[in-house]
Image (tube, rainbow, N blue to C red):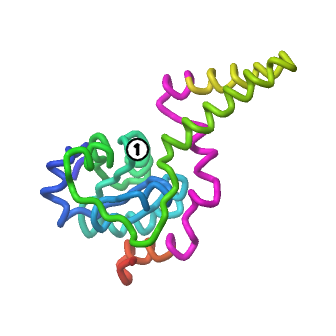
Amino acid sequence: MARTALTADHASARLHELTVIDVRTPGEYATGHLPDAHNIPLDHLDAALPALRTAAERGDLLVVCASGARSAEACRRLAEAGITAATLTGGTSTWTQLGHDVHRPAGVRAPWPMERQVRLAAGSLVLSGLLAGRLHPGARWISAGVAGGLVFSAVTDTCGMARLLAKLPYNRPKATDLDSTLTALSGGRPSV
């Protein structure tokens, strides 16, 4: 498969022949993921390159995230490592909007999606800066800094705040989960 983007309908029709890699945080993954998707958060992609190379030798890779931005970044990084992969156009958001099946682990309470976590953190910081600015005018720079960060995020299609939030414990993979995923991709026993 050349480095491309697949629509949700096209990916659904080919799902049985694709190895799906979900690069969202484990918390986002737990909210619902494509059937048989393997969770490798974007910040763990480099460590997973050997397993992903092995998986790509056995078949086509489809990389997914919530909107398509992180999966496009992952595909770019994989291409730099000589691994060909496609991204899911519109991500899991479009996938679910079109009514395609998602799997959710039973009994797992998933944290909010990353985009919602970013909105809460950014809004809280802006509001705190404005309220604290009533007593200490310099505190308004907190709000200005967040606003500048949001503009930069939109212009560059990156999100520093999401990268920071992804480091919180509930957004991190358990070492055993990631090891199990890498073993499965390398041709070992399938991850559960």
Q: Which residue is found at the position 50% from the left and 70% from the top?
A: 178
> Pointer 1: what residue?
76
Relative to residue 26, is residue 103 drawn left or right?
left
Can residue 45 be seen at all in this image of the molecule? no
Q: Nearer the viewer, residue 66 or 60?
A: 66
Residue appearing at x 45%, y 67% in the figure: 50
As helix, strand or loop, the secondary structure at mark 1 comes to helix
With respect to residue 71, does 49 lie above or below? below
Q: Quadrant of the C terminus?
A: bottom left
Question: Which stretch is magenta?
Answer: 151-178
The reply to whether residue 164 is in sight is: yes
Please tell me which residue is depicted at 59% across the width and 44% down the height of the picture: 163
Please state the horizontal and vertical placement of residue 12, each as a whole percent of the image.
Answer: 17, 55
Q: Quadrant of residue 126?
A: top right
In the rendered image, the vertical position of residue 109 relative to residue 76, given as above or below: below
Q: Is 165 a magenta residue?
A: yes
Q: Quadrant of residue 133?
A: top right
Is 114 part of what is drawn in magenta?
A: no
Between 82 and 178, the one lying in front of the other is 178
- Which residue sits furthest bottom? 189
The residue type indicated by label 1 comes to Arg
- Please tell me which residue is depicted at 31% across the width and 64% down the height of the picture: 103
Viewed as shown, does residue 16 lie left or right of 48? left
Foreground residue, 45 or 131?
131
